[in-house]
């Protein structure tokens, strides 16, 4: 079996140069490896031994421990509102994940592209870069999440026509109008999936005198949550601790009540969309009337959110095929053809 020179070169390149694109989200971290596609999709949670500070679990395993750990183990979500809340834990998490996806490689320090919110400050950018370098990156490049999502969906970001993208994640909602490989107008609000979970948690506490955990609130949102009235009204049994008696109890919750609970975070997202549209130059606004709005991020999976945005904005709304993977797919496309997308990448220079 004869190998061409190119195929041998590709094989060697894959063996030594496994460059990585990371969507480091508040709730979920996705990793794309050059030539292999998405190889990791796990929660952004790390569990450590309190005494030794040693990592006991990361991702799925660590998420199962949230709210259930004894005093000597701590399960932490090191990202808050799309930015690093705990520098050491992010470094630990990244190192664990990178080792996991590179275990079959002859270990070389990879080049890493990390997606960051568009409203991130210079200090926060530096924190992301330092975490990635400490976790073993050779070079770190940053890409704005809305641009990565637009590329992931397949929008022509390099053209002078305007495209509007809304990326609803766990910690932030990114709204951006993109043209000529750049963001023309944008709005980054720290209201997204986590705020909805918290709103459900508070609603149940107030109306049913029941205390539930974050994971239960998230489960309720996924199973029966909706943003727009539907014909059928689903119900779910919710188990928690009674606020008065302190004894565990079960209540029934309907999708209508969940919609009522998440009304406030949803209206904040709608308001942010309206403000972004107001700031958009008229020529690009005309393009958006034709092409409409594109939805990405895990929050786009909430039932009826596209209908709600369509009703409020009078614009066509398209949900990406796999909205929760759009950002990392876009970052992966940038990784595989960096010269083509050099305008959208910002390199963090050392001072």
Image: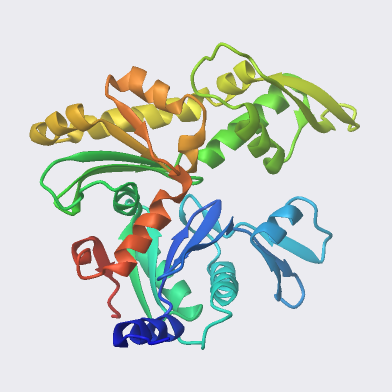
| Colour treatment of the image | rainbow
Residue 28: x and y in percent read: 55, 54
Residue 98: x and y in percent read: 53, 74
Q: Is residue 135 above or below residue 265?
A: below
x 63%, y 20%: residue: 255
Residue 351: x and y in percent read: 28, 80
x 43%, y 75%: residue: 130
Closer to us: 185 or 2: 2
305 with respect to 9 (left or right): right
- Rendering quarter of residue 319: top left
Residue 104: x and y in percent read: 57, 81
Which residue in the rendered view is the most extreme toward the top? 231
Q: Quadrant of the N terminus?
A: bottom left
Residue 121 shows in the view: no
198 with respect to 70 (left or right): left
x 75%, y 70%: residue: 50
- Rendering quarter of residue 109: bottom left
């Amino acid at each position: 079996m004869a190998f061409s020179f190119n195929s041998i070169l590709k094989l060697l390149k894959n063996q030594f140069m496994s460059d990585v694109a990371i969507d480091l989200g508040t709730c979920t971290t996705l990793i794309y490896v050059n030539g292999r596609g998405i190889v990791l999709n796990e929660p952004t949670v790390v569990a450590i031994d309190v005494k030794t500070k040693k990592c006991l679990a990361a991702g799925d395993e660590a998420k199962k421990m949230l709210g259930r750990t004894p005093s000597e183990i701590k399960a932490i979500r090191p990202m808050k509102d799309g930015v690093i809340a705990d520098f050491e834990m992010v470094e630990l998490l990244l190192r664990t994940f990178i080792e996991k996806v590179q275990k079959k490689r002859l270990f070389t320090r990879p080049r890493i592209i990390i997606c960051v919110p568009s409203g991130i400050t210079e200090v926060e950018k530096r924190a992301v870069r330092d975490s990635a370098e400490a976790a073993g990156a050779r070079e770190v490049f940053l890409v704005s999440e809305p641009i990565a999502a637009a590329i992931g969906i397949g929008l022509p970001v390099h053209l002078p026509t305007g495209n509007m993208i809304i990326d609803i994640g766990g910690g932030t909602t990114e709204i951006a109008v993109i043209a000529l490989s750049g963001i023309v107008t944008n709005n980054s609000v720290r209201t997204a999936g986590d705020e909805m979970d918290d709103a459900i948690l508070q609603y149940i506490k107030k109306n049913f005198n029941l205390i539930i955990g974050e994971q239960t609130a998230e489960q309720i949102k996924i199973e029966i949550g909706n943003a727009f009235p539907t014909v059928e009204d689903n119900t779910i049994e919710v188990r928690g601790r009674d606020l008065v008696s302190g004894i565990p109890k079960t209540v029934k919750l309907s999708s209508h009540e969940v919609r009522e609970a998440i009304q406030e975070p949803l209206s904040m997202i709608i308001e942010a969309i309206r403000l972004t549209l107001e700031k958009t130059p008229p020529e690009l606004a005309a393009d958006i009337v034709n092409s409409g709005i594109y939805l990405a991020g895990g929050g786009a999976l909430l039932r009826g959110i596209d209908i709600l945005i369509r009703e409020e904005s009078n614009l066509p709304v398209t949900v990406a095929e796999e909205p929760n993977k759009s950002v990392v797919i876009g970052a992966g496309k940038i990784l595989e053809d960096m010269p083509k997308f050099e305008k959208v990448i910002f390199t963090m220079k050392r001072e």
